[in-house]
């Protein structure tokens, strides 16, 4: 869907496209930290740093969700394997969701902002990573891609249709 990741009140968790320090920044991470309030960063500090492709779980704080799953996507230009690292992000998110019985997740397009991953390539990797793992997950009922721009939304719709 097209919308604001921080306004997804009908899911259990949102995904933060984080930096390795789990610190507030620009883009999705900045929006999530602003909406969640300072308690989110305080909870994140002892969990950092995390590596590309990994994920950690925190409470949602002032977000309208119980949980926030933070994952660090690849910086496209400097990654030796951007597709593998991006797929690992989604896999890590789904693993945490399955372990914690999180049924409904909203995720942005990881790494497509300042990390420079081309949206078309990222959408194909993301859709494949989520759908290929989806049937094996017992507790995860929904993974919603929440895209800010019309262009990113259209690209993700095409990626789903082409799978």
Image (cartoon, rainbow, N blue to C red):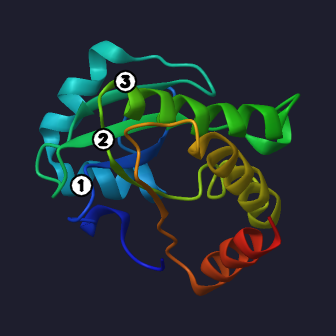
- Choose mark 2 or mark 1, whichever is in front: 2
Relative image position of residue 6 (x, y in whole percent): 29, 62
Q: Which residue is mark 2?
A: 68
Q: Which residue is mark 3?
A: 99
Element type at marker 3? Answer: helix
- Choose mark 3 or mark 1, whichever is in front: 3
Question: Disc 2 versus disc 1: distance between alpha carbons?
Answer: 13 Å
Question: Disc 3 versus disc 2: distance between alpha carbons?
Answer: 14 Å
Relative image position of residue 32 (x, y in whole percent): 31, 53
Element type at marker 1? Answer: helix
Q: Residue at x 29, y 20 (%)?
A: 45
Relative image position of residue 44 (x, y in whole percent): 28, 26
Circle 2 residues within 10 Å: few <14, some 14–19, many ≥20: many
Q: Residue at x 74, y 55 (%)?
A: 122
Ranked by sequence position, the earlier of labels 2 and 1 is 1
Which of the two residues, 95 or 82, is positioned nearer the viewer here? 95
Residue 123, placed above or below residue 58: below
- Choose mark 3 or mark 2, whichever is in front: 3
Q: Residue at x 57, y 36 (%)?
A: 136
Element type at marker 2? Answer: strand
Q: Residue at x 30, y 33 (%)?
A: 101
Ranked by sequence position, the earlier of labels 3 and 1 is 1
């Amino acid at each position: 869907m097209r919308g604001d990741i921080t306004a997804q009140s009908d899911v259990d968790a949102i995904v933060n496209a984080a930096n390795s320090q789990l610190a507030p920044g620009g883009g999705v991470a900045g929006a999530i930290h602003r909406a969640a309030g300072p308690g989110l960063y305080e909870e994140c500090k002892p969990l950092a740093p995390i590596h590309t492709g990994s994920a950690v779980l925190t409470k949602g704080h002032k977000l309208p969700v119980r949980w926030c799953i933070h994952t660090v996507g690849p910086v496209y230009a400097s990654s030796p394997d951007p597709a593998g690292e991006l797929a690992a992000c989604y896999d890590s998110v789904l693993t945490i969701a399955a372990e914690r019985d999180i049924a409904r997740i909203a995720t942005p397009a990881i790494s497509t902002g300042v990390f420079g991953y081309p949206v078309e390539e990222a959408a194909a990797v993301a859709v494949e990573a989520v759908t290929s793992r989806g049937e094996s997950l017992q507790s995860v009922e929904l993974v919603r891609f929440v895209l800010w721009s019309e262009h990113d939304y259209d690209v993700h719709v095409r990626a789903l249709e082409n799978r």
